[in-house]
Amino acid sequence: MELKVLMNPKNFNIKLENIKGISIKPQTLRDFLHHSVSMGMNNIVATERNLDPLISNRKGQSVIEFLMTFTIVIGMLLFFFKMAIGFTNGYLVHYATFMSSRAYLSNDNPRTTDRDGAALRRAREVFDRLLPRGFITNFNGTLKDNDPDATRIKAYVGLYTEFQQAFSGGVVGGRDLIQLRSESFLGREPTRDEVLFQICSAIKKIAFDDCESLATLDDNGY
């Protein structure tokens, strides 16, 4: 016997088609389908009963949830801690550069002809004292200068420091080091020799005489 069962999706009415001319009462088929569905549901219920001890056992669930939450919280704390260390390093480098630039601004060593070079060496001594080696992990910064004689725009005369460091330890921005630069362009005061030369030039224009015969001041008014 071969039957074809058609179900209407709107009202779920069952229609039968007699494939080989065999006549079957609708009531008999309904009883058959009902019995089959009941057997299937009984098997499902039996299976759920067999698995019920495993499903109802929730031991360890809170431990897993705690570990997941703890990992996320610790990761966020480490991320912000690394960023805070990076910002702190930047402030330290900038402060050391600023104080070195002050020393570079006012230093004047009369015992050498390279006054700007002596001022740069003095500035690096200040920089190393404020930021000793090893104070910042893996610090590779170098203090450099914009020399007054070589710098065309005098507003950029001063010192700067270039260094590299990671932004967040690889969480944001990758693990590549980023290039950072700290600048302090305070300028450079004229040396004593430059002041004497400027005063002497001004006296010559007024008195038309040699500076050695006149008393001059070691200050050009700056």
Image (tube, rainbow, N blue to C red):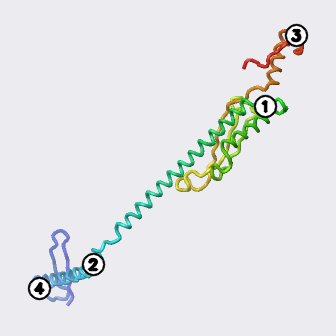
Q: In the rendered structure, are the residues bearing label 2 and label 3 in contact, judged by CB atoms less than 8 Å apart?
A: no
Q: Distance between the residues labelled 4 and 2?
A: 39 Å
Q: Is mark 2 on a helix, strand or loop?
A: helix
**Disc 4 target residue:** 28
Q: Which of marks 3 and 4 is in front?
A: 3
Mark 2 neighbour density, 10 Å: few (under 14) some (14–19) many (20 or more): few
Residue at image location 47% in from the left, 57% down from the top: 75
**Disc 1 target residue:** 149
Marks counted in the figure total 4
Mark 1 neighbour density, 10 Å: few (under 14) some (14–19) many (20 or more): few
Residue 119, labelled with which disc?
Answer: none
Q: Distance between the residues labelled 3 and 1?
A: 29 Å
In the rendered structure, the answer to whether residue 184 lies left or right of residue 218 reads left
Q: Distance between the residues labelled 1 and 4?
A: 111 Å
Label located before the other in sequence (4 or 2)? 4
Residue 53, labelled with which disc?
Answer: 2
Q: What element carries label 1?
A: loop
Q: Distance between the residues labelled 2 and 3?
A: 114 Å
Tell me where residue 172 appears, x and y as whole percent.
Answer: 53, 53
Q: Distance between the residues labelled 3 and 4?
A: 137 Å
